[in-house]
Amino acid sequence: QLYDFGMIGLGVMGRNFLLNVADDGFGALGTDINEESVSALNEEGKDMRVKGVATQQEFVQLLSKPRKIMLLVPAGSIVDKVIEGLLPLLDKDDIIIDGGNSHYEDTDRRYAYLKTKNIRFLGTGVSGGAKGARLGPSIMPGGDRSAWEDVKPILETVAAKVNGEPCVTYIGESSSGHYVKMVHNGIEYGLMQLIAEAYDILKRVGGMSNDDMSALFSKWNDGRLNSYLVEISANILKYRIEDTDEHLLDLILDKAKQKGTGKWTSQSAMDLGVPIPTIDAAVTMRAISAFKEYRQDNSKLYKDIHPEMPELTGPGFAESVEKALYFGFVTCYAQGMQLLAEASKEMKYDLDLEGIARIWRGGCIIRAEMLEKIRHAYGTREGLFNMMATEEFRHDLFDCRESVVELLHQANERGVPAMCLSTSLQYFEVFRSERLPLNMVQAQRDYFGSHTYERTDQTGVFHTAWDARSIHKAGDETDR
Ligand code: 6PG
């Protein structure tokens, strides 16, 4: 009997995804250039309708048509190589699903190319890590709609469920699935860094122990901060090494790696002119973390800068950190969602933002209770610009702001940096400022480069010969 679904790339993600497909009664077939990965699949799936084969020829022959083939291989040129290898073996209308974190521009290129070869392509974001792949990820497929219709029964069955609703939906044309996954990862970077900063403030401003922080994070996870990242942070904080009873977290080097999706989010946001400073700050913090030696030297040079200050304790302090973290989370999601809204227009993705918030509620790394509110905010307002001012979030942000200001003041006094949280506060502040000092920037541009400016009291475009104290309306002067 032929198999329903094929996987190329049997690393832990690919293998787990395939076992998940087989759990749900579909015939699942896998292949990999690494023989050990093929054997591992055959071993793990020996009591299921799962099979690992060594060659692509056999793989392609054993799949039912139209073939549904997912690639879970490292992003980049390997994807192109695998596609090139497959093409001569495939038939018209077969489906290739790229489930990796490919750059959306690569996906656009592959989508167009495969169309010329009569192969249907789905650039698909898959989130949830190894466990999510095994038990139910959040899946973001974009590209050929008819291909989506064909794989829908399988993807809907394997995806995570929230209140019975599968965490997968057709995202849109071309590279939209990978774009949405990229922004998911940008938000992921922001939330992770905000949690790290909350941990640092609790530890270095409040003097809290890892075990107490773990209990606090668990408590938060039962409230409005309920989320996968807060949950795992509570577990990380209490994890001890068996032999020595030390907390593993304390022994982990503070240099964070990155594969690029956060940076791509910032790059794309810059291109589109959408401010996402919390996410930018999180990307920046990963870069800064790499300069460990320089930081070490500087910490000695500047060590006397901060006076000894008392630790802040008591329930009021912990409550402030909860408020600050909630404030940071809301601003981070708000930035990601605004970027999606703009990208939807610019790249003609026609995204359903309510649907995206819905499929992020389960399975993925940024799943969180507040996505239900985000879903509601976008579901009830056409063309929402930014969710911060909606009824869903306005009062909470207003209520939390004071705590963020006070906490950052206390952290600054003690020299505890909190780049993402500070940026989140500034993001909120500038967006509630009717007037910003950018009149000065405009004046400077005009002064040195005759770039012109508009005025608040008159219509038109103006240029001033600033040194000569004369004002001309742009267009009717000769000295520009
Ligand atoms: C997910 C994750 C995943 C990503 C890792 C590592 O949604 O399951 O986003 O796709 O690869 O989080 O990313 P970095 O190495 O860039 O931190």
Image (cartoon, rainbow, N blue to C red):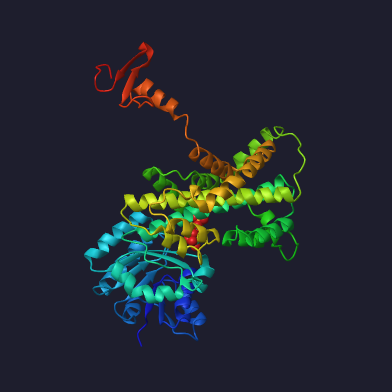
Q: Residue at position x 50%, y 39% from top?
A: 432
Left or right: 399 with respect to 206?
left
Residue at the far bottom in the pictured view: 1
Percent x, y of residue 68: 34, 74
Q: Quadrant of the N terminus?
A: bottom left
125 vs 250: above or below: below
451 vs 27: above or below: above
Percent x, y of residue 95: 31, 71
Foreground residue among 356 and 196: 356
Whether residue 420 is visible, yes or no, is: yes
Percent x, y of residue 337: 44, 52
Q: Residue at position x 58%, y 45% from top?
A: 398
Q: Quadrant of residue 227?
A: bottom right
Q: Quadrant of the C terminus?
A: top left
Foreground residue among 351 and 145: 351
Foreground residue among 171 and 462: 462
Percent x, y of residue 389: 49, 47
Q: Residue at position x 31%, y 66% from top?
A: 121
Left or right: 40 with respect to 197?
left
Q: Residue at position x 28%, y 68% from top?
A: 120
Q: Quadrant of residue 30?
A: bottom left
Residue at the far top in the pictured view: 468
Whether residue 189 is visible, yes or no, is: no
Left or right: 359 with respect to 211?
left
